Amino acid sequence: MPCGGLRLNPSPRLGGRRRALRLHGGLRVLGCGLVVAAAVAVGAFVGYATNRVAVWLLFHPVRPFCLLGRRLCVWGVVPARRRELARRLAGLVEEYLATGAVFARMEEEMRRAVVEEVRRLASSSPFAGLLGLEAVVEPLGERLASLLSSVASSLVRRVDIQRVVEEELARMSPVEAERMFRSIAGRELGVVVYSGLVLGGLVGLVQGLLLCLLG
């Protein structure tokens, strides 16, 4: 403040302390940012790697890998349970096909296809008009569809669908089984892997912020 025409300069020590405090605050913020970034990176990597390994262990190893004299064995879930999975999937297929709604839909599709084929054959004949084939297309198609439907229904009841499906699935190699599962649920498996990355990053963010607040 001016006093008697003179201006008092701030103490050099006070200015140096202020600069030191500003530098210390900046370094603290920078350190906090680095800690949070490192925590997020480590958490995201751990989450991604963990889920990636978990998905890999569904299909690998394709044969038992044992340690400690076969006391500890690692084997992929799908190769180890291939026969059980085949039996359960075959049971689900048979149960689904055994429902009346499925047979009703199959009969309807078969009737439509037979009628359309009979109509196409009748229309392609040059004597269709002379012989009056148009009048018998619908009844003939319905009759053929009914006959084929009864034959198919009888065959399905006689065939052991569960056994056939189970044998075919159990005959698949581990590589073929993995390819089938990935073709069916590949997108979902990818979501599982990358959700680990996201969740791991969020956990790392929370940990980094807590370290900064409590440190």
Image (cartoon, rainbow, N blue to C red):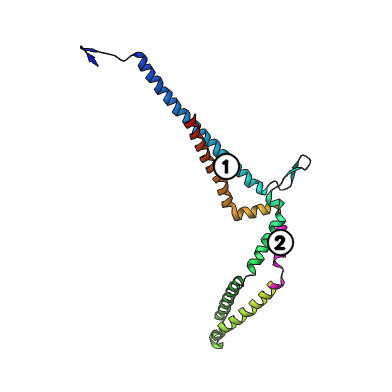
Measured in 3D between alpha carbons, the distance from the residue under mark 1 to the one under mark 2, in whole angstroms, is: 35 Å
Residue at figure coordinates x 69%, y 63% from the top left? 165
Residue 159 position by quadrant: bottom right
Q: Which residue is mark 1?
A: 48
Amino acid at dot 1: Tyr
Q: Hey, which residue is sitting farthest left in the picture?
A: 4
Up the image or down, 36 lies above or below 74; here it is above
- The region drawn magenta spans 157-171
Magenta stretch: dominant secondary structure:
helix
Residue 174 coordinates in the image, percent (x, y): 70, 52
Question: Is residue 183 visible from the viewing direction of this image?
Answer: yes
Amino acid at dot 2: Glu
Q: Which residue is mark 2?
A: 166
Residue 114 coordinates in the image, percent (x, y): 59, 77
Residue 137 coordinates in the image, percent (x, y): 56, 83
Q: Hey, which residue is sitting farthest front in the picture?
A: 214
Asked if residue 192 lies left or right of residue 63, the reply is left
